[in-house]
Image (cartoon, grey):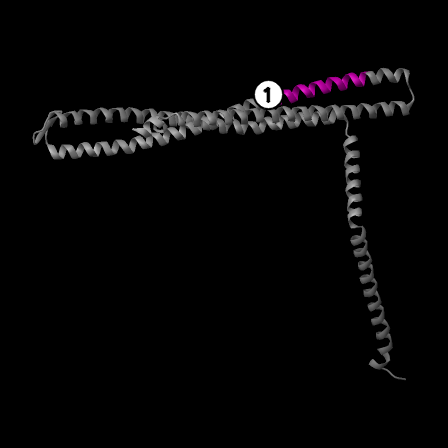
Amino acid sequence: MIVGPAALRPWSTVKGFGIMCKKVLVIATLAVVAAVFVVGGRKMVSHLRHWKQQLRTSWEESIPPEQEISRLRMEVDRLKAEDSKAYDQVVRQGREVKNLQKKIDNLKQELTADVANIRERKAVILANKDQFVTFKGDRVQRGEFAAELRQAAASLMVREEKLKSLQDQLRAKKENYELNKKALFERELAREKLKTELDRLETKLTVEKQAQARAKNTLNDAGYLRIEDELSAVRERIETMTDKRELMDEIRSRNASRAAQKRREQDARIDKFLDDPRFSPQQAEQ
């Protein structure tokens, strides 16, 4: 009798063959699945999408209209809470506009004083050809006084450029501020319209429920009542879809009108700029 590795060799061979067969079976199965996906993959994916859509539709139809109306009211309230942040932002923009306007007004007053000072200095230079000039009680060498005049003029030029830049910033900030205020107003109107529509749907649903209750007193067939309920639910959903589309069309129409208005304003600014005397043909002839 042989005892040892030689005696175990036949069993090891059978076991190894079994493992190899399992691997071949797994590979063959994967190959079949891959072939199915290659041949009919798109169709299978389409069926899965259709099944998903049917499941979602069935789930949505199972939700009572009262619950949907309550959910929509919650969403409208959430939009109002989000708009609160927008109000804070617009208020900050308004403060920036006011502060910038105040800064510009102060700079204009300073520039007006600088212009008056340069005018007085220039009058002294033109009126007196002596080596020394007198300005506000001080006797100053003419060359030094002329240098001070040029320095004051150079400073005024820089500050006037700064004023122009600030005015450009103010125009941009004002335009953005007004647009945002208008957007907030439109959001408020849209929310009120949504609330009104929800109230209308809720009233209509109540009337429908009352009509169903009256019908149940004369019509006790469960099949008819079920179909009437389902028809009512479909009708409500279709009307809701119609109201949503009309609201979206209204918003798009307002946005288009606002864009057209901005284009007209831009064209008007360009036309006004082209009316500058620098672009006149008579100016070129001179």
Could you tell me residue 126's position as x and y percent?
14, 26
Q: Nearer the viewer, residue 94 or 77?
A: 94
Residue farthest to the front, as pictured: 285
Residue at 31% in and 27% down: 107
User: Would residue 208 be counted in the magenta stretch?
Assistant: yes
Q: Residue at x 39, y 25 (%)?
A: 275
Q: Quadrant of residue 30?
A: bottom right
Of residues 252 and 180, the one nearer the viewer is 252
Q: Which image quadrant: the N terminus?
A: bottom right
Q: Which residue is mark 1?
A: 189
Instruction: Answer with left or right where residue 236 lies relative to residue 126.
Output: right
Q: Which residues are magenta?
A: 187-210
Kind of element beneath mark 1? helix
**Residue 192 seen from this side:** yes
Q: Is residue 125 left or right of residue 232?
A: left
Identified by mark 1, the residue type is: Leu
Q: Within the magenta stretch, is there residue 195?
A: yes
The rendered magenta stretch, by its main secondary structure, is classed as: helix
The quarter of the displayed image where residue 278 is located: top left
